[in-house]
Image (cartoon, grey):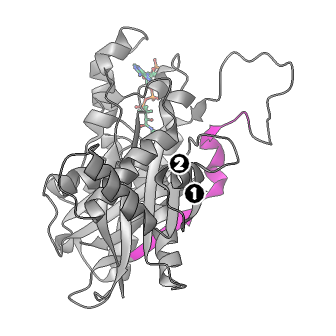
Amino acid sequence: MAIEIIGTGRAVPSRRVSNDDLAARIDTSDEWIRSHTGIGNRHIADDHTATSDLALEAAKNALAMAAGFSGGSGSEEWNRVVAEAAQSIDVIILGTATPDYVGTPSTACIVQHKLGAKQALAMDISAGCTGFVYGLEVATGLLSLGRGRKRALVIGAELLSRVIDWEDRGTCVLFGDGAGAVVLEVNDAPSEGPERRGLVRSMLWADGSGSESLLFRRGGSRNPFKPGETIEKGICVEMNGQEVYNFAVKAVTDTANALMQADGIGVDDITWIIPHQANARIVQAAARRLKMPAEKIYLNIEEYANTSAASIPIALDELNRNGKIKKGDLILTIGFGGGLTYGGNIIVW
Ligand code: COA
């Protein structure tokens, strides 16, 4: 029994904000942002969009692909195919740090309802930027149990522009909005041996001792907003950049080494590494330690900045739709982020 990805999709807001656009408002420059992070642009949602809206669009695109629909999106036929494919989904897992609502309902439930996926269980995963990597393993675990569950939708979706302090140049230049999704299906392909397919291995970790290096301090049960309190800023992400940087380089290196060792593979066996797109310098530093050729590492941070849990499924969909993945290719995903959390998956296409 294998659990394979049979559809990918993404949704990115059309509004593109360049480094120069930011430099016109705050004390920064295109040169600083590019040289310190590799970021050139980010896509920012309009005021009416919520995380579930981006998640829904990405999920629909993944469902259309899973159903074999090759026409353009949005047509009556496309809508019919997507609605029918949604009926076949048993599990919806959505990784996000920026849910529509604090606590409940989960953003996954909102997506489940809007898709009309009536037989699906639905829940969010709060694992920061590692949310999608965690989500793949949780969905695989649920599908592996049997119990009649055959298909899962795993989504990473974020609206980080809503939780950024746009006056803080140390964080606001780093993040963007977006969503990515995959459809997983249980099938008869082997999951071991030379012909193995699908999600063959995941390794996941957490280190809560670093929980304060990346957090939304206000609004939860620890520091709730109080009645009558005047707040100057909404909920904002706070980050200790240097701490997160050091953690991230080690997390990428350790995860890649652990996955390769556990699976008995080497750098030459890997077709693509899809790292979480937080900072090109983090990835390049880890690649040097791993002696990993740069051309095996997929980076699209220049266009989207850090979209947290959405970055890996957006990258996966780009590679897939651009015909850059073929059957049998081995892909390593590597996530790291708030929690602190980290880990990765091995996917044989
Ligand atoms: N534009 C211009 N200057 C900036 C700036 C910006 N957007 N942001 C910070 N600076 C300045 C600082 O004020 C500081 O100036 P000073 O020396 O006069 O005090 C200088 O640049 C260096 O700041 P520093 O924080 O040491 O830069 P850095 O080289 O560590 O890079 C990050 C900062 C945020 C890019 C880097 O620490 C990083 O990428 N960390 C990880 C972030 C991340 O990946 N988060 C998400 C994880 S999922």
Badge 2 vs badge 1, beta-carbon distance below 8 Å: yes
Q: Report x, y in % for residue 88.
A: 42, 69
Distance from the alpha carbon under mark 2 to that under mark 1: 7 Å
Q: Which mark is residue 96?
A: 2
Identify the image quadrant of residue 267: bottom left
The amino acid at mark 2 is Thr
The amino acid at mark 1 is Ile
Side of 2 relative to 348 (left or right): right
Which quadrant of the render holds ligand 1?
top left
For label 1, the residue is: 125
Image quadrant where one finds the N terminus: bottom left
The answer to which of 246 and 303 lies nearer the viewer is 303
Specify whether residue 276 is in view: no
Q: Which residues are magenta?
A: 201-219
* As drawn, 14 above or below 220: above
Residue 186 among magenta residues = no
Q: Report x, y in % for residue 74.
A: 29, 43
Name the residue furthest top: 24
